[in-house]
Image (cartoon, grey):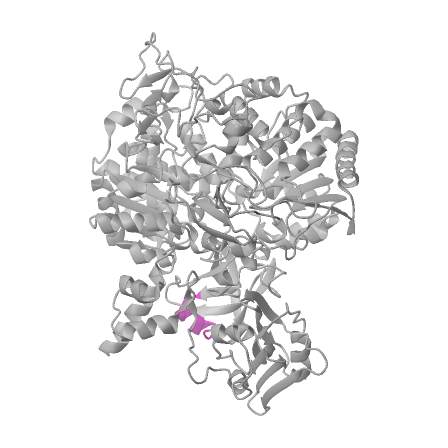
Amino acid sequence: MEIDEAREVRTTCPYCGVGCGVLAKVAADGQVSVRGDPDHPANFGRLCSKGSALAETIDLDGRLLYPEIHGRRAGWDEALDLVASTFSQTIAEHGPDAVAFYVSGQLLTEDYYVANKLMKGFVGSANIDTNSRLCMASSVAGHRRAFGSDTVPGTYEDLELADLIVLVGSNLAWCHPVLYQRIAAAREKRPEMKIVLVDPRRTMTSDIADMHLAIAPDGDVALFTGLLAYLGQHNALDRAYITTHTTGFGQALFAASALDLGGVATATGLSEDELDRFYSLFAATAKTVTVYSQGVNQSSSGTDKVNAIINCHLATGRIGKPGAGPFSVTGQPNAMGGREVGGMANMLAAHMEIENPEHRDRVQRFWNAPNVAQKPGLKAVEMFQALADGRIKALWIMATNPVDSMPDADAVEAAIKACPFVVVSDVLAQTDTVRHAHVRLPAAAWGEKDGIVTNSERRVSRQRAFLELPGEARPDWQIVVEVGRRMGFGGAFSYETPAEVFAEHAALSGFENDGARDFDIGAYAGVNEGDYNALEPFQWPAPSPATPLWPVGHLPRKGGDHLSVRPSPITNDAGDTRPSKLPISPLAGEMAGSPEGGVQAGLKLEGNTIRFFADGGYFTPDRKARFIAIRPTVEIRTSPDYPLILNTGRIRDHWHTMTRTGKSPRLSQHIAEPFVEIHPADALRFGIGDADIVRVSNPRGDVLVRALVTARQRQGSLFAPMHWTDQFSARGRLDTLTAPLTDPISGQPALKHVAARIEKFAAKAFGFAVMRQRPEPDTAAYWAVAKCKGGWRVELAFADDDIDWAGFAGSLFGAPPGAEMSAYHDGDAGQHRIAAFDGDRLLGALFVAPGPVAVSRGWAADQLSADHVDRRGRLAIVAGRPGGVDVDRGAIVCSCFGVGANQIAEAVRHGCGSVAAIGAALHAGTNCGSCRAEIRVIIDAQSLQAAE
């Protein structure tokens, strides 16, 4: 790509649902660097460790660059014709429900929109679902039950205005670090702010918490129904709000009173004193925000958990007000956008309901569609079960990796392998899912495609391309459009640009809306190419100027008021490519309503922030919120054979199945292999030591992972991350253990409450190696590879120690004949250390021991980038420790600046007694801040040693 001068492009991060603004700078030589956008209202310049390392993930290593059919390169026309004809033939022979799309929160809204339109409007089936089903489907279901719509009432600003934040099932410090840092900064300004963490684990988020409630798995329903009962017993209710804006309170309160405080204590595993302190704090604090995430959603009772939380906010009137409300934070960059376009099997586009005949008719007329789906389709778990039993005969997977992320993953893989026709659109040539595709379609990656995403606070932002498309890769929306045309629907799929798709999406949101639906961005229905390119972040709703609007504080009265109509903020001239002045929100300074006192009367704008429901205005037929009567239940899944509860989740520096983060050496420094956390008492019970390789298993499968013994884990429970795949580990695919058990309402699987057992793996030898080329350590029973600066690193464990270690090392390193080898062997002690050199370069180093290898990983990896002219210095590599002036940083704590635990401990010993002092001395914790809690742990440990 030829660039005459450096340029900086405003775009949006492709990781979690925070939706951070990113400035991507492309230098004249093509080198890319990124920084946070200081003007973006989601992050104000902050980025987490993953966002900060985005420039390390955009190389073409491993990219799928050309279409493939049955493993051979093909042209686009041949591949698209095959996809279109096979889907058309399958529909003709077996009906529309014999085909399915499985899509992703990684897609941009334009991609999502055309895929949903093709399947639901023209194929005539609702068999399109998304990996967002695994992330936030229970929040969607809970919102719809309570509000009549999938509406997030509040905004990020509420996190800074609240006097009490309750974090439920959310390790915000690691999974949404920028929001965590916004809270931390607000807490520094207002030390009186209180934070309660509800989580079985004492995660790094607990560092900021005043109270940690180490709740039993799935105890959340009991906790919050108990809170509702407490609020009723102590008259801590907003009875005016309940009477005016809600229904069903009496039934909900009666159901919540099924357990007394002692019963709630039993169901939650908390003490009555802990419950009383939390309940009294909640009751006494008007400005309360309850933030919840996967610990709530990923449960067989996830929808009830969501509604139990919402019930408490409705009962106190703490919703839609500055600093008050329930707040679902999403895990993917465009899960919200997928919800807006109807990208889930039980939804129509623009937040319309597939079960509602008026909504189906409206969408059909707008699309001029021949065959709108008449009923909900198969949700994710059901979809792959239908694939397994043959009901689905053609499947198109886009931008996701279900072989690793779906529950009962081995069964999912078997179903995909058995399917007669599988299409996968992806950016990588090799993933655990792509390997089973009959047709592989090369998709554009982040930095190469244009579109929009919506974050957790309903804020719409642009992703912009700053790189050329490599090879023959194409944007997902364009691929879907081409298939739609080839299936005979060309008139409905005539888009030439993503701006045209977005404009239609916006127009549908406002079509026959008039304030009746929450999602409305009709103000943007007329965007031209210039408007689209210049689009600034905005929050919805953003109705067209034709929608009635009233000044702030002036609610619409029955019979109508004088309308405050403003000129259109955009041009409708499709030929005009000049950007017009688009507002941050067309509601700025006003609030929407309808002449009949319409449902948007509860909408309020404070500054540039829009909230819902402070004054009611719900999207139910009577415009009142619904209390949901919920009775807590306790489900026992453990047994004598499987006595432990496995909780799955994410870690700080990796994301999903590592197709992006696995490319970054920086992000693999912190944690480079799959692991399981286990409480010390459980480790003692099962004979497991720290750093042992262990087998975690249940009837569905087993994994081999590293043991991390820690009191942060709840006794009787295990925690393991879901990121590792067959591309990065021998047996690390954690979701082979999770069951296809789902919430009966949302269809979201229960990924955090899995019965399992653990046992020590009888390893005869352990190894660690660094090398320039990617290794293929098939001899090892356990292996986990990770990128490092200058090459790769790999952890190893062997079931047999009768191995030619020199030969194994040479093969592992890819050492050419004649490479210089240095070695140390002590066969009796089981110690072997081998290094190979090509001139002054280290090709690789292998360290073998009878137990977990005690060598500094960071230091060893650094040797791949060093010159080794001094042959005496090479002895340090074989010795496995730095010599002379070399520094062993220790385990990396701060990925942003590569600062290790040893460096932090040394700084503490020299007088740095606070996180701020460490930041000033080493820069650690001063960028994304997600390592600050770990820095504090090291400071506390060093202080304790000094005191002793």
Please give the name of the residue rendered at 42% of the width and 46% of the height, measured from the top-left corner.
Answer: 293
- Where is residue 688 drawn, in percent x and y? 47, 74
Q: Is residue 629 left or right of residue 24?
A: left
Magenta highlight on residue 685:
yes
Q: Is residue 202 left or right of residue 503?
A: left
Q: Is residue 98 above or below residue 541?
A: below
Please give the name of the residue rendered at 68% of the width and 41% of the height, measured from the top-left corner.
Answer: 396
The quarter of the picture where the C terminus appears is bottom left
Q: Is residue 304 left or right of residue 388?
A: left
Q: Is residue 277 above or below residue 538?
A: below
- Where is residue 883 drawn, in percent x and y? 45, 84
- Residues 15 and 225: in front is 15
Q: Quadrant of residue 837?
A: bottom right
Q: Which residues are magenta?
A: 678-690
- Residues 868 and 596: in front is 868
Please give the name of the residue rendered at 63% of the width and 60% of the height, measured from the top-left corner.
Answer: 727
Magenta highlight on residue 930:
no
Q: Is residue 307 left or right of residue 572?
A: left
Please give the name of the residue rendered at 37% of the width and 63% of the height, measured from the top-left corner.
Answer: 712
